[in-house]
Image (cartoon, rainbow, N blue to C red):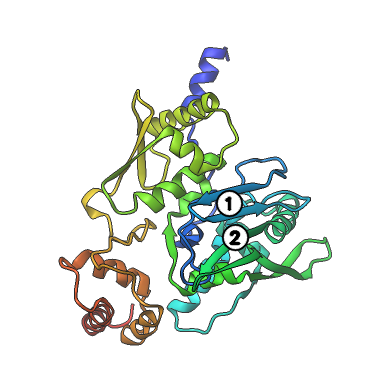
Amino acid sequence: MDAENQNLVTEMRSPLLPDRREQGDFFVCDIFDAVPKGDMVSMEHPIFSLSTKPDIKARRYEHGKNWLAITPSIVGLATVHDRDILIYCISQIMAALNEGRQVHRTVRFKAYDLLTSTNRQTNGQAYDGLKAAFERLRGTTIETNITTNDLEVLEGFGLIDRYRIVRETREGRMQDVEITLSDWVFNAIRANEVLTIHRDYFRLRKPLERRIYEIARKHCGAQKSWKIGLDKLHKKTGSSSTEKEFRRLVRNIVRQDELHNHIPDYSIRMDASDILEFVNRRGDRAGKVGQGRLAFNAAPSPRQLKPDTFTDARAAAPGWDVYYLETEWRSWTKEPPRNPDAAFIGFCRQWFEKRGRP
């Protein structure tokens, strides 16, 4: 096969990894807006490295008087692909909450289930990769100053506090694993600072594609479209590429998306002035849950619901995913109610009366 035909074959091949197993919804902590102390400034700094090689470069982000520093261990910063482990743990906790069960910072699971759920292979190399990812997640340290009651508090914490491989097979492969999440991540879960992601997120090959999807998920959400300049996107992704190289990488992703529509939920376009536009593929149906798509929070209410409200909502609609019901309620509500928490609980009660258990 000559070079021209080879390039054509490569061009037409799907950028997505093979779909190794059907999965449902996955939740990811919106840790850039996590509120460990209740009044931390919103953070949109790229915490996870895009590099496929050990990244030992420390990072610092400043926002007004507040700052955030990310320090790697000797094995490097946690990567975008390491984030899969956090997503899986968070999804297990959210599933327990949806069923009304008590949750803890420590999550126990089968290593095989994690690998298959995040669309990874299950060979020996994949198990070795998990061990390395656990080390990077445990070793990455986040330090920030938080102002409360006119007092500046310096605090350092990690993404996970510890991991434990409970049992291994005779071949040396881990089976049962325990992960203890940091207070920062766990508090974000309890504050409902979570987003539902499309399962094809795990099929995106390139770390930059995953990071771009995360940014679109956070900022575009259920809107019909959202725009951002290339220079600002460069900063948000945390890419260490030069401006010229970053433009080339992004244009390549845009071109592939035009051919294959492979970026979940959002199409990407880029004009001559380096402005990217993310267009919601769901159009007017944004905010509905179905076929493994995103559970958007198209919020008509002026504020987030209280964490205790979701406990009452589970009692009002036993067996239902309260975050799915929240999405339905927000898309159904035309005007912001005076008491959103009471209105949502009432909606859940009526939903259950009409439909019963799912």
Question: As rendered, which of 78 and 353 lies closer to the eye?
Answer: 78
Picture residue at 41% right of the left edge, 31% below the top: 254
Q: Earlier in the sequence, mark 2 or mark 1?
A: 1
Q: Which residue is mark 2?
A: 144
Q: CA distance from mark 2 to mark 1?
A: 13 Å
Q: Are marks 2 and 1 in contact (CB under 8 Å)?
A: no
Label 2's element? Answer: strand
Measured as percent of width and height from the top left, residue 140 is found at 68, 56
Question: As rendered, which of 10 and 70 lies closer to the eye?
Answer: 70
Against 122, residue 154 (above or below) is: below
Picture residue at 25% right of the left edge, 84% below the top: 349
Picture residue at 30% right of the left edge, 45% below the top: 281
Picture residue at 31% right of the left edge, 71% below the top: 326
Label 1's element? Answer: loop
Task: Give the amino acid at mark 2.
Answer: Thr
Task: Give the amino acid at mark 1.
Answer: Ile
Measured as percent of width and height from the top left, residue 109 is found at 64, 71
Locate the C terminus by quadrant: bottom left
Q: Which residue is mark 1?
A: 47
Locate the N terminus by quadrant: top right
Measured as percent of width and height from the top left, residue 207 is found at 56, 42
Pointer 1 local density, CA inside 10 Å: few below 14, some 14–19, many at least 20: many
Question: As rendered, which of 54 and 282 lies closer to the eye?
Answer: 54
Against 14, residue 85 (above or below) is: below
Determine the residue located farthest toward the left in the rendered image.
Answer: 334
Pointer 2 local density, CA inside 10 Å: few below 14, some 14–19, many at least 20: many
Drawn side of residue 176 relative to residue 64, left or right: right
2 or 1: mark nearer the eye: 2
